[in-house]
């Protein structure tokens, strides 16, 4: 039997059919393109939290992994994987109670065994941020499936705050992919080769594709234990900091955020693009010129002081928008800092007087000084400034461009570390002890974090003593004494306290840091679960 439909019925049938198709497409998740944040980054990138500690590595970690605790905007520890914790009366034992049901990206549940394995692995490898806990943790114990205990070698005042930089990895997955033999005995390579290319995390994002030479593409974790429905569907870290490319990508809406290394003139040029704005906020960063205290002529404190007096701080500060002259190694708002510590200023007469006290006086032509600046960080002008200022007092400085990777390799020995190196540093946790330990304790010599090579046992003891102090006020008081001691040694020219600066697509992206709401932790403002992207607004900007 043939059914004849009138015109209205045919139209209604077509509408119903179309609606049905749209519903099916929507249910398949292809109704619209995924929202994405693309972020320009320095390279190379390590995705193993036991290996890297540079900015680009931390940005990857905070999205791929989960720490035991998180920090709020004021730097206070809040529950995360650990729902609560206890501290023993003597301050030596910390017991953490885990949330049940949190899953790694492969579906396995996080347990106390994973927490213990992660800390044991971190300390055994001894790279990345492992130095924070080396010599501090005696043992990590599994109490039961969801309870883990850290027993300390000594009291460690900021211990809870430091744990936001401790990321939990998947024990079973790594153990199944350990390669033997290796440098870690029964643990072979401790899974370093496998983790360098594979996802072993539980974070809000998981690896979709990783081209180790070019980019890391992450997608939202559909089983994350916290609400992230409004976060971007994807996050892509692109291995380029080239200014022209960044400007092109931003104008085509193919890049949502620049990295922190952009020069001010690059940011200002990018900000002329409709819908793009510059976000600036205090991040605890101090820009400085490190002096290798073990290589002539900077092994002589009088030469170091001469350079500190000769440097033109007023001009240098103007090189970095929104900056102020640094007061010692710590940012003013970093807890434990001394805002009244001694501050050098340009004084050529004092500089020349210091040089006359030097054992190298009259022979400076025999000791040319090598100054390097990283092409990844726009500090060429600062390097050229120290060269000109040194010339004013009769010292010869040769400026050389390098890369972060090459400088990190050169930092492995006293002889290959340049006499001068321009760089910057941001605390790994919101307290003065983070900077004092990572920048000046002997435990970090041979890394890019400390190119001064102080190797000062008195200073080491002062830092260790302060970190072991549980009472916060007493600990902060000790930090101030350490700052005074470091400034007296003059191992560094403290140039400027520089804000974090990025250009971002304000026209279709909500970025909490731009609103003055950054999380008080190293690079946590780039945790994608706090960011929102509006694809409709992006499409409108593309059409204009």
Image: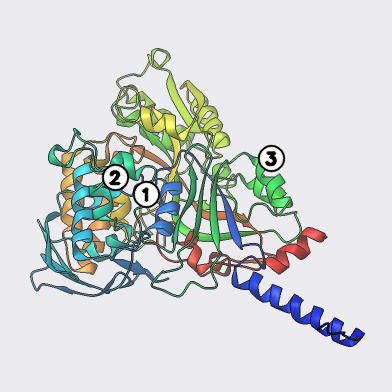
Element type where label 2 sits in the image: helix
Q: Give left or right: position of 140 versus 295.
A: left
User: Could you tell which of marks 3 and 1 lies nearer the N-terminus?
Assistant: 3
User: Residue at the spot x=30%, y=69% of the render?
Assistant: 81
Which residue, given by chain and number where applicable, does mark 1 sit on?
329
User: Could you tell which of marks 3 and 2 lies nearer the N-terminus?
Assistant: 3
Q: Picture coordinates of residue 318 (x, y %)?
A: 59, 47
Label 2, residues with CA under 10 Å away: few <14, some 14-19, many ≥20: some
Which residue, given by chain and number where applicable, does mark 2 sit on?
486
Q: Give left or right: position of 512 versus 65.
A: right
Q: Quadrant of residue 291?
A: top left
Element type where label 3 sits in the image: helix
User: Could you tell which of marks 2 and 1 lies nearer the N-terminus?
Assistant: 1
Label 3, residues with CA under 10 Å away: few <14, some 14-19, many ≥20: few
Element type where label 1 sits in the image: loop
Q: CA–CA distance between discs 3 and 1?
A: 33 Å
The answer to whether the residue labelled 3 contacts the one labelled 1, judged by CB atoms less than 8 Å apart, is no
Q: Picture coordinates of residue 227 (x, y %)?
A: 45, 75
The answer to whether the residue labelled 2 contacts the one labelled 1, judged by CB atoms less than 8 Å apart, is yes
Q: CA–CA distance between discs 2 and 1?
A: 8 Å
């Amino acid at each position: 039997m043939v059914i004849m439909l009138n015109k209205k019925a045919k139209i209604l049938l077509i509408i119903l059919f179309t609606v049905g198709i749209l519903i099916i497409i929507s249910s398949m998740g292809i109704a619209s393109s995924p929202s994405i944040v693309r972020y320009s980054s320095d390279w190379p990138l390590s995705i193993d939290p036991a290996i890297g500690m540079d900015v680009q590595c931390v940005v990857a970690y905070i999205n791929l992994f989960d720490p035991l605790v998180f920090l709020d905007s004021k730097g206070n520890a809040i529950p995360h994987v650990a729902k609560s914790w206890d501290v023993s009366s003597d301050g030596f034992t910390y017991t953490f109670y885990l949330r049940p049901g949190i899953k790694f990206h492969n579906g396995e549940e996080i347990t106390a065994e994973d927490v213990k394995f992660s800390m044991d692995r971190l300390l055994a490898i001894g790279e990345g941020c492992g130095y924070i806990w080396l010599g501090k943790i005696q043992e990590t114990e599994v109490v039961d499936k969801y309870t883990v205990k850290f027993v300390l070698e000594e009291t460690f005042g900021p211990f809870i705050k430091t744990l936001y930089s401790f990321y939990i990895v998947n024990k079973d997955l790594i153990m199944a992919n350990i390669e033997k033999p290796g440098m870690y005995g029964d643990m072979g390579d401790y899974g370093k080769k496998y983790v360098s290319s594979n996802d072993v995390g539980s974070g809000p994002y998981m690896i979709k594709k990783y081209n180790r030479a070019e980019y890391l593409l992450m997608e939202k974790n559909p089983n994350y234990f916290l609400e992230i429905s409004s976060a971007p569907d994807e996050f892509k870290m692109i291995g380029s900091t080239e200014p022209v490319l960044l400007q092109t990508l931003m104008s085509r809406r193919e890049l949502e955020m620049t990295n922190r290394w952009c020069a001010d003139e690059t940011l200002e040029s990018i900000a002329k693009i409709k819908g793009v704005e510059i976000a600036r906020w205090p991040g605890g960063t101090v820009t400085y010129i490190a002096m290798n205290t073990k290589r002539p002529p900077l092994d002589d404190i009088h030469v170091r002081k001469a350079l500190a007096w000769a440097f033109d701080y007023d001009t240098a500060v103007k090189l970095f928008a929104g900056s102020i002259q640094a007061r010692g190694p710590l940012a003013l708002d970093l807890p434990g800092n001394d805002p009244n510590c001694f501050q050098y200023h340009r004084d050529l007469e004092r500089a020349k007087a210091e040089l006359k006290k030097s054992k190298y006086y009259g022979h400076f032509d025999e000791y040319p000084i090598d100054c390097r600046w990283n092409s990844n960080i726009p500090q060429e002008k600062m390097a050229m400034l120290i060269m000109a200022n040194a010339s004013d007092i009769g010292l010869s400085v040769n400026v050389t461009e390098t890369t972060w990777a090459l400088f990190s390799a050169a930092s492995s020995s006293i002889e290959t570390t340049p006499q001068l190196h321009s760089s910057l540093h941001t605390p790994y946790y919101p307290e003065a002890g983070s900077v004092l330990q990572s920048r000046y304790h002997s435990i970090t010599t041979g890394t890019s974090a400390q190119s001064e090579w102080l190797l000062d046992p008195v200073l080491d003891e002062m830092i260790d003593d302060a970190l072991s102090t549980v009472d916060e006020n007493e600990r902060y008081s000790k930090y101030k004494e350490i700052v005074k001691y470091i400034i007296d040694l003059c191992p560094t020219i403290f140039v400027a306290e520089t804000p974090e600066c990025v250009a971002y697509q304000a026209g279709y992206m909500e970025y909490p840091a731009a609103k003055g709401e950054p999380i008080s932790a190293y690079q946590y403002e780039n945790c994608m679960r706090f960011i929102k992207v509006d694809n409709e607004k992006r499409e409108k900007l593309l059409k204009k």
